[in-house]
Amino acid sequence: MIRRLLSGDPPRSTVLAVLLVLIVAALAAAPFLFPGPKSLAVAAKILVFVILVASYDLLLGYTGIVSFAHTMFFGIGAYGVAIASVRLEPGWTAVFSGVAGGLAVSLAFALLIGLASLRVRAIFYAMITLAVAAAFQTLVSQLSDLTGGEDGLNFKVPQMLRPAFRPLSEPLFGVTIDGRIITYYLIAAVSVVLFLMLLRIVNSPFGRVLQAIRENPFRAEAIGYRTVLYRSLSNLLAAAFATLAGAMYALWLRYNGPDTSLSFEIMLNILLMLVIGGMGTMYGAVVGASLFVFAQSYLQDGLHVIHDAVADVAPLALLFEPDRWLLWLGILFVVSVYYFPSGIAGQLRERARGR
């Protein structure tokens, strides 16, 4: 049953399986194990970025397409929900209309970019997508009447997703169930479904063709596969999943702006998460997103504790200064790449296959 649910592609490594179970269990019980707004926000961000990174893995890890426009589709999904919720009566109709509109715009952009650019060499395609993403971010900032410009858009969500909504009069396991908890579990349920869909796609005959194109596009073309068509379909699918991730993120934040979903920093973070987790594994998205978002959110707090403990030792206190958390994040990334050159999930699967 579990094997069928995982589309015939289990983790294949006991260590990886245990790590995935621990991550899933922690995310499933996060509102009760780690009560508090910050921990819940971190868990929700992990869920969203698992889907965002997994969708980029479909593009880069399985098809071999290097694109810097992935955050554009993420932002389109977020802006779709935000604009619809502002322009229409706040409710589920606005949310679904925003998601549908975001998907339509994303697929149109992905199709145009794919048909116009996928025949060129990889480096030129990457530069084209970078230029398109930068132009789109500038356009969004200038269309202030529609997008709110640099200030972004604040909007209302459906009644049952608002913090004031209380379906239960008494706390459950010591936690008050409100609209934020419901929103979190809604995002969790959608993320599980989307991840299983991506896992099914990459393990289907279509996914096998994508991997063949990644390994040798000329050979794939020679045996009869239209590589441009398959690469375009991969581009469309990745854009659709990124759009849905953006819609979930906007629904959680109840806000969206250029820096929230369109910044190039997010694109760099996606690449880091994918490299840390492991490209071409899908499971690497879960591991990479969880570790990176957790470190990004709590590393500075951890350094603050260490800094206070070694405050009397000047060199150590200087080294563990909380403001240097980005330096330590970079060190952790270098160490992870050194010991896991194929990513954590990829390296664990290779070791299990070797044994």
Image (cartoon, rainbow, N blue to C red):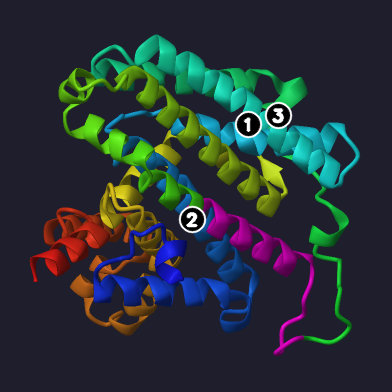
Does 295 sit left or right of 236 as displayed? left
User: Picture coordinates of residue 136 (x, y %)?
Assistant: 54, 20
For disc 3, the marked residue is: 101
Q: Identify residue type, mark 3.
A: Gly
Asked if labels 3 and 1 touch by Cβ distance under 8 angstroms, the answer is: yes
User: Picture coordinates of residue 333 (x, y %)?
Assistant: 24, 56
For disc 2, the marked residue is: 196
Q: Residue at x 70, y 89 (%)?
A: 173
What is the magenta segment's predominant secondary structure?
helix
Query: Element under label 2?
Result: helix
Give the mark nearer the N terminus: 2 vs 3: 3
Mark toward the viewer: 1 or 2: 2
How many angstroms separate mark 1 from mark 2 (CA)? 19 Å
Does 277 sit left or right of 161 as displayed? left
**Crowdedness near tag 3: few (<14), some (14–19) or many (≥20) residues, C-alpha within 10 Å:** some
Q: Identify residue type, mark 2.
A: Leu
Q: Identify residue type, mark 1.
A: Leu
Q: Is residue 245 visible?
A: yes
Residue 233 drawn above or below residue 187: above
Residue 120 drawn in magenta: no
Where, quadrant-wise, is the C terminus in this rendering?
Answer: bottom left
For disc 1, the marked residue is: 103
What segment is highlighted magenta in the picture? 172-196
